[in-house]
């Protein structure tokens, strides 16, 4: 089975060498201790690969005062439409309306907006 990875295969292969950084990082020290404990219980683990898990946190939309929206920095799903880079999650707006929608205050002062 294959999964999408946000780091290069080379970074995944270097997981064991990252344990050297445990001298500087408290969280990594915990991982290194657990791995060494497992290796002491079963020395064959020293010859098995150590795997990484990558997690990506996507920032929500920032609303500007003029109604424009600043989307995710370094979007993993950006696409090209009519020669311009477009966020794939908002491509439907371009296809249906010819542009990205903007929001504006609803005038009621309750912090909500209308499209």
Image: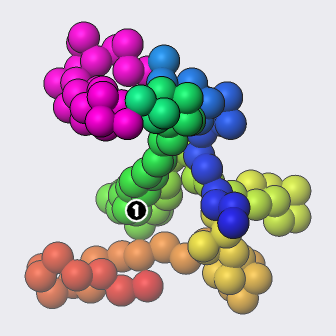
* Quadrant showing the C terminus: bottom left
Taking the image as shown, residue 29 lies to the left or right of residue 75, namely: left
Residue labelled with disc 1: 61
Is 76 in the magenta?
no
Q: Is residue 60 above or below residue 110?
A: above
Q: Position of residue 45 (x, y in %)?
A: 46, 35
Taking the image as shown, residue 57 lies to the left or right of residue 31, namely: right
Q: Of all residues shown, which one is farthest toward the left?
A: 110
* Quadrant showing the N terminus: bottom right
Is 34 in the magenta?
yes
Q: Is residue 54 visible?
A: yes
Q: Residue at x 28, y 18 (%)?
A: 22
Q: Position of residue 34 (x, y in %)?
A: 25, 35
- Which stretch is magenta? 18-42
Q: In the rendered picture of this protein, how many numbered marks are placed on residues?
A: 1
Taking the image as shown, residue 39 lies to the left or right of residue 14, namely: left
| Residue 94 quadrant | bottom right
In depth, the one of 71 and 96 nearer the eye is 71
Q: Position of residue 88 (x, y in %)?
A: 67, 69
| Rendered image coloring scheme | rainbow
Q: Is residue 57 above or below residue 26?
A: below
In depth, the one of 11 and 111 nearer the eye is 11
Q: Main secondary structure of the magenta part?
A: helix
Q: Residue at x 61, y 74 (%)?
A: 90
């Amino acid at each position: 089975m294959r999964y999408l990875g946000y780091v290069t295969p080379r970074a995944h292969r270097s997981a064991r060498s990252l344990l050297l950084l445990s001298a500087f990082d408290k969280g990594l020290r915990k991982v290194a201790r657990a791995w060494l404990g497992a290796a002491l219980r079963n020395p064959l683990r020293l010859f098995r690969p150590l795997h990484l898990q990558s997690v990506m946190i996507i920032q929500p939309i920032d609303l500007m005062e003029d109604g424009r929206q600043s989307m995710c920095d370094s979007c993993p799903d950006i696409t090209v439409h009519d020669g311009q880079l477009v966020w794939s999650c908002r491509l439907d707006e371009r296809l249906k309306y010819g542009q990205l929608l903007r929001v504006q205050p609803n005038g009621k002062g309750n912090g909500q907006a209308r499209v």
